[in-house]
Image: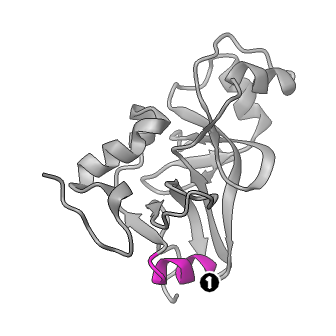
Amino acid sequence: MSEENFFVNKFLFFQEKNQNDYFYNALVYIFEHNKNGALGVVMNKIIPISEEKIFKSLNIKTAKDQKHILNGGPVDINKLFVIHNQAEEKESLCVEKGLNLTSSIDVLKSIGQGKFNDQYKLALGYCGWDAGQLDYEVSKNSWLILDIDPLVVFERDPKDLVKEISGQVGYDIDKIQNSEIITKH
C-alpha cells in the first residue's frame, strides 16, 4: 500500500462468518496503520471482569465501578489500555479527529481518582498486523471498512455498537459476506 495511514481513524468490521475465528463479528478501531503494520482495538467485545477488579490489581483505588472492560485483541492481553478523546494527554497515541490510546499509569490513576472525563474505555490487549498483513486481509474482503464518527464508542454500550453503526451506514454490517451489501428495509 502506498498511502500511509490509510485505515487510521476507521472502523473495520470482520466479514468472515466462521464463529471459531477470534475476530468473528469484531468491530476494530484503527489507531495506527503505516508501512510497518497496523494497530487497533476491538471495540464491541467485553470480558467478564470489572473495572474495580482491574484497578485493584494495579493498586489504584477507584470510587466507581461502571465501565465494561473491552477484549481489545489477541496481542499483549495482560496490558491495560485506555481509549479516550482528551487530545491534550501527552502520553497517548493521538489520532487527529479521532480516538487516543494510552497505557499510562498516570492516566489510569487519574481515572481511578475521578479526575479524568467520563469519555474513556478500558481494554485488555490490542490487535496488531505486520507490514502488509492488514492490506492483504482487506484485499481479500475479510474486513469491511467503515468511516464513522469514532465518538460513537462513548455513546453506546459495546454490545450495541454494530447495530448503531449499521443504522448510521444504512445497512446491516453483520449480514455482509464477501462484500455483498444487504440493504435495510
Give the quarter of the image for residue 135. bottom right
The residue furthest left is: 185
Horizontally, residue 139 falls left or right of residue 181, namely: right
Above or below 94: residue 82: above
Q: Amino acid at mark 1?
A: Gly
Spot occupied by residue 148 in the image (x, y as percentages of width and height): 34, 54
Q: Which region shows up in magenta?
A: 133-141
> Between residues 92 and 6, which one lies in front from this camera angle?
6
Residue sitting at 52 percent across and 73 percent down? Answer: 5
Horizontally, residue 38 falls left or right of residue 108, namely: left
> Between residues 65 and 119, which one lies in front from this camera angle?
65
Spot occupied by residue 79 in the image (x, y as percentages of width and height): 79, 45
Say few, some or many: other residues with alpha carbon within 10 Å of mark 1 (under 14 / 14 to 19 / 20 or more): some
Query: Disc 1 marks which residue?
Result: 132
The residue furthest top is: 63
Spot occupied by residue 59 in the image (x, y as percentages of width and height): 87, 22
Above or below 1: residue 179: above
Residue sitting at 25 percent across and 47 percent down? Answer: 167
The residue furthest bottom is: 2
Element class at badge 1: loop
Residue sitting at 53 percent across and 39 percent down? Answer: 86
Residue sitting at 19 percent across and 60 percent down? Answer: 183
Spot occupied by residue 37 in the image (x, y as percentages of width and height): 65, 75
Q: Is residue 94 magenta?
A: no
